[in-house]
Structure formats: C-alpha cells, structure tokens
Amino acid sequence: MKRGHLSEYFSGVAVKRLSAVEADVFRSHQHEFNGVEALKRLFGDAERKVQFAARFMYLCDDEDPVESDGFLTWYDARDRHPTRSEHRLYFPANPAIECAAEGDVLVLAKRPDNSVLVVVAEKDTTVSNQVQWLFGVSDLAHPGFSIREELETDRDRIALTSRAILESIGLDIETPPDTHLDDMLRMFHGKFPPTMAFSAYARNTLQDIDPRDDPDSAVIAWMEREEILFRTLERHLVARYLAELDKTNVEGFLGFSKSVQNRRMSRAGYALENHLEEVFTRFQIRHSRNPVTENTSKPDFIFPGSAAYHDSQFDPNKLTMLGVKSTCKDRWRQVLAEADRIKLKHLLTLESAISLNQTTEMRSKNLQLVLPHSLHVTFHPKQQEWLLSLRDFLTLLEERQTTS
C-alpha cells in the first residue's frame, strides 16, 4: 500500500461493460455471475463459501446516487468435483443494481478491509467516463473483466481530480498531514476566513509557483493546496465544535452540519475564481469580475471589462465572457443566459471526462470548454481536439486586448 495512491483504498478492481444478458441478471431474482478466471485474481480460489460485505451504488449524471448495503458471496458450485471448479459470485437483490441496463459500466472494487464497493455507472455519461478514467480502464470493448491489482503507478496518485471522483462514489479521502494548522489558527483567529483571503494564503504557501511559467499547472497546484489546507482547518474546527456540543441540541447540530456541507460546496467555486483572477492579474489581462449584464445576470468574468461591455460602440467581437464552475454537470447551461452581446461563451471547469453527448451539445450551443491542460487526457481524443487549455484562453485574451 502506497500512501496517496489508489492502493491506499483498493487492493484490486475488476471493470466491465454489462451485456444484455448480464443486465437481465441484475434485474432478475437470480443475481449470480459465473466466476470467470479473471475474478479469481480478485477473490481467489473459493475452498468454501466466502462472504464479503458490500456497498452497492448506481450512478448517473442527472440524479443522486442509488445506494444499498449488502454482501457478495463467492463460492465454487463444484467444490466436490475432483477435477473441475465452477466459481460463482452471488449478490442479493437491492435497489442499486436493479437500475442496471445493457452497456452500463460495472466496477467491483475490493477494499483493503476485504469489503467490496460495487458500482454501476450509466452508459455514455460523464460519471461512467470518470469511473473508467479513475481506475485506468479505457477499453471495455471486449466482453470480459479488465483487472487491475497494481494501483501504485504515477497515474494512480490521488490528486484534485481523482479525489473529487472518489468522494462522488462515497469514499472519505484522508487529508495528508500539513504543518500549516498552527499558522492558520493564528492568522485566521480560529475561524474560517473569507474565501479570497484563504485563496491568497494558499498561494502564499507555494511561493515558487509563477503562473506566467505555466498557468494551467499553477491553477491546479493552487487548488490542490487550498483543498488540503481547507480540509486541515475544517477538521480541527469541526472537532472543536463537536467537543463543545450540547448533546441535547439536535437542531443546533443539524444546522452546523448543513453549514459545513454548504461551505464545502460553495468554497471550491469561489477558490477557482480567486486563483483565475490572480492569473489574469499576473498576465495583465483587463477584466471585470461578476459584472452586471442583462436581466441582472452576473457572469464570472468579462474581458476587457464591464465598461467595454456596456459601450454600444465597442466591437462585440473583441468581448469575451468566461463562466467558472469547478464542477459543471448540467449547470453549464446557466452560462448561456449570461452576457447577451457575446455569442460564443467560454466556460472553465475542473470537471474531468465529460461525456461526448454533453460536449456535443455545448458546441451546438456556442459554448467553448476551457480546462487546465492536465485534464485533457481524461477526455476522448476527438474531444481533445476541441478543448482549450488555460494557456490557449490567455493567448486569445492577449490577442483581443492588443487589437482593441
């Protein structure tokens, strides 16, 4: 087990695309797979019935996950036969697996504690692409399982993108220890600071990074550092609150829990905007952040600024609009209603492996996707030809700023 890699959370994974027959098995009363040879690498030879605690999840892009707790039973149906074995994997009916359909992606992920995470991800969705990318399995054209037991390569390192995917499938990812806790408690007086101040602090702990050298890598590094620092401070402050909690104050606890979740969800988006604004400033790109446009809309960034946007004499072809969403899902459509003068919108996100259906629709709606260059590899090669990196986007802004 190598800390900071997938091997810290999984001892092996088996991934396949469900055939029509297998999907029927999931929905029938006989929930059982023949134990093909590949699964023996994951579960071993069954000299007796072996039962594994299991967590079942069905994932799709448009709805919350369907989750169930249960078990898997691994056994040899011919354990008394002198020369032949016939391994099978049995699982009881549950709401999660009953959602399965032909073409969905099935993941059997064995945990170090010998439990198993069973994930079914809807076919042709962003979440199915993300699950395949996470476990390093891209070719599922063959009918059998793809097995990975060594999860300690460089691509298996848990970084910003993989952390987000792991948390979406219910894993609580351990935050690495950080030496800045005492400094943060002193500087922020034992509280959460405003997001802009926290982002500036995170950047200040990485003073050797200059976005003018590599803006794509800089934004990823700043976001990763801020995530670690935030989780470090959050863990301390939440533990302190729980230690002082009046155990009879249920409403107080529920309100605090909700505030923690809301802070987590909103902070990432603001942090990304903060770091991008630092990049624009370092590159001397004129901009306005959250200006008011038509119908009181507030796009995240307008270039070269609000005054130019509201000047009817300013050439609209020299105007640029950027929406920013750390994760986009279906929320990317919100950007389309902002800044009417600008026909082609730009959206920067950290969402990996967005489905081909989604990016095709984005292109049809005149929305150009921008992602840090390291995330491009999570997309299909045909999609990569269309994507812009942050460096590409800055070059576009510089050209328009020079000629305006």
Image (tube, helix red, strand yellow):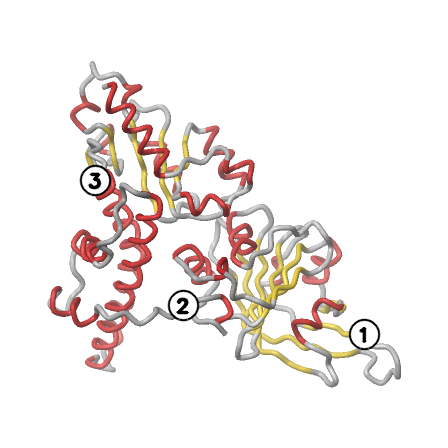
Judge left or right: residue 104 versus residue 309: right
Of 300 and 135, the residue lying toward us: 135
- Ranked by sequence position, the earlier of labels 2 and 3 is 2
Q: CA distance from mark 1 to mark 2?
A: 37 Å
Q: CA distance from mark 2 to mark 3?
A: 33 Å
Residue in the image at 48% along x and 60% along y: 154
Task: Name the residue carrying label 2.
Answer: 173
Residue 282's label in the rendered image is 3
Q: CA distance from mark 3 to mark 1?
A: 64 Å
Q: Which mark is residue 86?
A: 1
Which residue type carries mark 2?
Ile
Left or right for 58, reference 316: right
Name the residue type under label 3.
Arg
Q: Quadrant of residue 52?
A: bottom right
Number of marks in picture: 3
Residue 185 in sight in this render:
yes
For numbered disc 2, what is the local secondary structure?
Answer: loop
Q: Residue at x 64, y 50 (%)?
A: 139
Give how far across and how far down residue 108 sits, in percent: 61, 66
Q: Is residue 303 left or right of residue 93?
A: left
Give the vertical position of 358 relative to 203 (above or below): above
Report the front residue among 233 and 19. Answer: 233
Task: Provide the secondary structure element on which disc 1 rests.
Answer: loop
Q: Residue at (30%, 63%) from the top-left corner?
A: 228
Which picture quadrant has residue 37?
bottom right
Question: Residue 30: where, in percent of width, then height?
Answer: 74, 68
